[in-house]
Amino acid sequence: MPEIGDEIRQLSTREVYRSPWLRLREDEVEFPDGSLGRYSVVDKDDFVVVLAREDDGFWLVQQYRYPVGSRQWEFPQGGWPAGHAGTPAELAQAELREETGLRAERLQHLGRLFAGYGFCSQGYDVYLATGLTHGEPERESTEADMVHAWRSDADLRDMLRRGEFADAHSIAALALFDHA
């Protein structure tokens, strides 16, 4: 069994692709036993997932997700647009307001997770938003088709069982909530 501190060492790196949303790089590496290998890594900025809790249920958003070719329900989530920055808690408030029009009196950090650490550096913070005030969404143009709706705890879990709530980040966030 490897000892703590036995890590993979990066020998070199080269950028293969870059867009405003991600960077793909290939790293030549040396494993602890001295053998050589290569990793392809997707670097993406971190994001947040927000569980907007009200009356024994949650506010969800639904939008068309081009890579899977269908509309999907999920918790509000997102990252800072290019040129903007702030704390994860500030981002959680911004995404909640943008996607649902809701403003939270209280935010509780439920945990930090990784999107797919076998190939991607991106992490995300999960927040529980309570003490909600309703307002108008401030959606970006790419979210023009987005809708939001409240679902009871029972409805949400039924959606999960039926495959209608299939976003892995949202399901992991719900698990953090269930075990908080």
Image (spheres, rainbow, N blue to C red):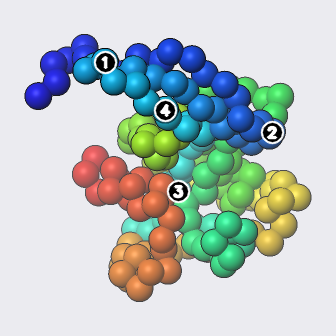
* Residue on which the image places disc 2: 20
Contact between labelled residues 2 and 3, with CB atoms less than 8 Å apart: no
Give the alpha-carbon distance from disc 3 to disc 1, as whole Å: 49 Å
Question: Which residue is located at x 57 percent, y 72 percent?
Answer: 73
* Residue on which the image places disc 3: 52
* Residue on which the image places disc 4: 38
Give the alpha-carbon distance from disc 2 to disc 4, as whole Å: 25 Å
**Taking 72 as reference, is 25 above or below it?**
above
Contact between labelled residues 4 and 2, with CB atoms less than 8 Å apart: no
* Residue on which the image places disc 1: 34
Residue 63 seen in the current view: no
Kind of residue at badge 1 = Gly
Front position among marks 3 and 1: 1
Mark 2: few/some/many CA within 10 Å (<14, 14-19, 20+): few
Mark 3: few/some/many CA within 10 Å (<14, 14-19, 20+): many
Front position among marks 3 and 4: 4
* SS state under label 1: loop
First in sequence: mark 3 vs mark 2: 2
Front position among marks 2 and 1: 1
Give the alpha-carbon distance from disc 3 to disc 4, as whole Å: 41 Å
First in sequence: mark 3 vs mark 4: 4
Taking depth in this image into account, of 94 and 162 the one nearest to the observer is 162
First in sequence: mark 3 vs mark 1: 1
Question: Which residue is located at x 70 percent, y 29 percent?
Answer: 15
Taking depth in this image into account, of 10 and 118 the one nearest to the observer is 10
Kind of residue at badge 3 = Ala
